[in-house]
Amino acid sequence: MNERIRSHRDLIVYQKSFAAGKRIFELSKAFPREEMYSLTDQVRRSSRSVSANIAEAWRKRRYEKHFCSTMNVAEAEAAETQVWIEYASAHGYLDPETTKQVIEFYDEILRMIVAMIHGSSKWCIDFKLGVGEMGVKEVGVKELGVGEMGVKEVGVNYFDANDCPILDQQLLLAPTSSTPNSFTPNSPSPNSPSPNSPSSNSGRSDA
């Protein structure tokens, strides 16, 4: 379904990564005190960095290479979060089922990020639109009274349709054979339902 993307908050991948970051924080509360400045700090930082870099990349999309570069950082942070979760599981801080669901949830986030990188031209703005010999054309700006007091603007419209594209996110993020799965050999099936957030089950393993 086509919808207008007004900010990074409208991106499905941002919403999923933000929800995952919040859940990681809740899960990490059960980590032992001695991990406060190591594992706990690392997993909280990397999980939050995923959504932060997605937001930053969205604001860099006027320049496709910058968009891809920053989304690649988000991809790396998501993979790093998986590693810290695996360490937490290995030390018995998380039960196997919770670990599995968190890893699979981040696999889904990684798949979306990779799809956005490889289809970057569909997500980025053509900043040359509306630019002619005289430069950028401004819409809805009326200049009155240019004098000693400067320029007074009335009826300024800063909305730019090109800056808020209408996209079918579900279609663009759908798995295709042309999108490489570089992050894991065990990605969730595209037909399997995607959870809204990682499992709420946590606790120490008996192992």
Image: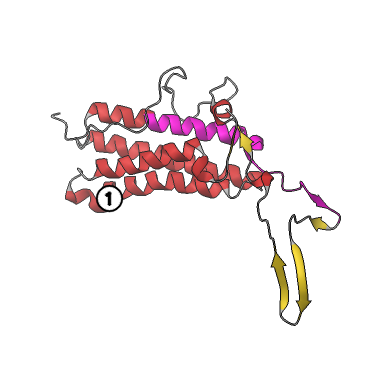
* Between 124 and 163, the one nearer to me in the picture: 163
The residue that disc 1 covers is: 38
Instruction: Give the image location of residue 42, x and y in percent.
Output: 33, 48
Residue 119, quarter of the rendered image: top right
* Amino acid found under the numbered disc labelled 1: Ser
Q: Nearer the viewer, residue 86 or 66?
A: 66
Going by the picture, which residue comes out furthest to the right? 133
Residue interval drawn in magenta: 105-133
Left or right of residue 101: residue 183: right
Instruction: Find out whether residue 88 is within the magenta segment.
Output: no
Q: Residue at x 50, y 32 (%)?
A: 112
User: Residue at the spot x=57%, y=26% of the render?
Assistant: 171
Residue 5 position within the rendered picture, expressed as x and y whole percent measured from the top left: 58, 41
**Residue 127 falls inside the magenta stretch:** yes
Q: Residues within 10 Å of mark 1 (few under 14, many from 20)?
A: few
Image quadrant occupied by the N terminus: top right
Q: Nearer the viewer, residue 72 or 196?
A: 196
Q: Position of residue 19 (x, y in %)?
A: 38, 39
